[in-house]
């Protein structure tokens, strides 16, 4: 364990050990709650018990196994939330699927936010204050909004009033949590911009989201070009044309296609694979146009 984690652990232990001493001191307890609300602890998975009031009893095996593989590869991106029962035992508030998957993945500890038994009001205040910080990445903001929903029973409209944001802004942040883990990971490290992430949310299929995400990363696509590609994919779906990967053109290849169309005065389609292989299809409406095209190519 790193020195930083050891120090963090000592700080958390001090907070939790002294909490009983500040139960009758609202100001001090508020400070403890605020500190716990933004601190992620590593808790042994075997010291956590499920919430007996959890309405969800069945978990999709396939989805659970997918999450297990994701955790093995990337770790757990979204911490769970637990309530402290005693010095070394906790009860789940939210995140039972993540907790189960982490145990199946072989994790001995799991990142978690720690709640006190009766800190509802102060937790809400602490989370709202945390959201106002300017150095949070988009995923951290999204997680804070989600915690207000899960733990404080706030609706989007209520949150909008408390944090001074538009309802649509809050909804857009929360939707980031539906993106595949690979994309969330780069959003958390700010390798991927909020603009790119919002554009990817225009696609509902995770497979298509990941494909365009790889284009962004490998080709350095701007947000505007990303939005254009996504519009093409959605249009292809509407018209019944299969949105195959080679139909998604790099902006430079699209410029070449436009130049050929202008030069030959005919519709031109360029198909290109990720490895650079492909074909050019030139359409014509008559034998005369075909002869003209051949003459221009020969020239």
Image: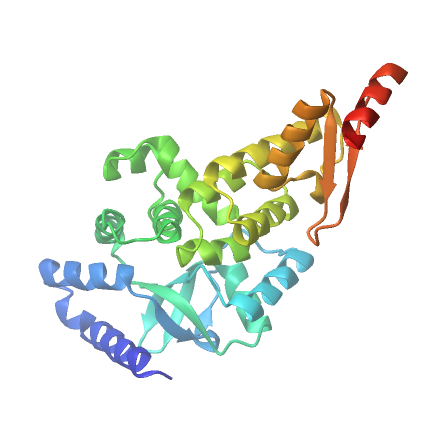
Is residue 286 visible in the rendered image? The answer is: no
Seen from the viewer's position, the closer of residues 192 and 169 is 192
Q: Position of residue 271 (x, y in %)?
A: 74, 40
Residue 179 appears in the picture as rendered: yes
Query: Would you say 12 lies left or right of 25 here?
Result: right
Give 149 or 173, whichever is nearer the viewer.
173
Q: How far across and down, in percent of the image, does residue 82 sit?
A: 38, 63
Corner quadrant of residue 5: bottom left
In front: 13, or 79? Answer: 79
Q: Residue at x 28, y 60 (%)?
A: 38
Coloring scheme used:
rainbow
Q: Quadrant of the N terminus?
A: bottom left
* Left or right of 159 in this view: 189: right
* The one of 235 and 289 positioned closer to us in this rendering: 289
Q: Is residue 37 above or below residue 90?
A: above
Against 98, residue 132 (above or below) is: above
Q: Is residue 52 left or right of residue 291?
A: left
Residue at 30% x, 53% y: name it: 136
**Residue occupying the far right of the picture:** 287
Q: Is residue 102 left or right of residue 79?
A: right
Which of the 4 quarters of the picture holds residue 242? top right
Q: How many marks?
A: 0
In the picture, which quadrant includes the C terminus? top right
Residue placed farthest to the front in the image? 299
- Residue 258 location in percent, x, y? 64, 29
Residue 189, percent from left and from top = 40, 59
């Amino acid at each position: 364990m790193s020195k930083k984690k050891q120090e963090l652990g000592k700080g958390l232990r001090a907070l939790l050990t002294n909490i009983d001493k500040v139960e009758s001191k609202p100001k001090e307890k508020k400070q403890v709650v605020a500190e716990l609300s933004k601190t992620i602890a590593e808790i042994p998975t075997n010291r956590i018990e499920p919430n007996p009031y959890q309405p969800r009893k069945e978990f999709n095996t396939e989805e659970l196994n997918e999450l297990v593989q994701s955790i093995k590869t990337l770790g757990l991106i979204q911490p769970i939330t637990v309530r402290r029962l005693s010095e070394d035992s906790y009860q789940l508030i939210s995140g039972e699927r993540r907790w189960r998957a982490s145990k199946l993945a072989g994790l001995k500890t799991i990142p978690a936010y720690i709640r006190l038994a009766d800190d509802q009001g102060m937790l809400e205040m602490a989370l709202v204050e945390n959201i106002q910080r300017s150095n949070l990445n988009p995923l951290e903001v999204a997680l804070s909004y989600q915690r207000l929903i899960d733990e404080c029973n706030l609706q989007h409209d209520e949150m909008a009033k408390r944090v001074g944001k538009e309802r649509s802004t809050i909804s857009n942040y929360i939707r980031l949590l539906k993106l595949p883990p690979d994309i969330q990971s780069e959003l958390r490290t700010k390798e991927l911009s909020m603009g790119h992430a919002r554009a990817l949310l225009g696609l509902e299929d995770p497979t298509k989201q990941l494909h365009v995400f790889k284009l962004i990363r490998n080709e350095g696509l701007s947000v505007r070009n990303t939005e254009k590609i996504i519009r093409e994919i959605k249009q292809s779906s509407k018209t019944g044309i299969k949105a195959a990967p080679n139909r998604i053109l790099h902006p430079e290849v699209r410029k070449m296609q436009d130049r050929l169309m202008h030069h030959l005065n005919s519709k031109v389609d360029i198909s290109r694979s990720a490895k650079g292989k492909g074909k050019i299809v030139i359409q014509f409406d008559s034998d005369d146009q075909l002869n003209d095209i051949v003459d221009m190519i020969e020239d």
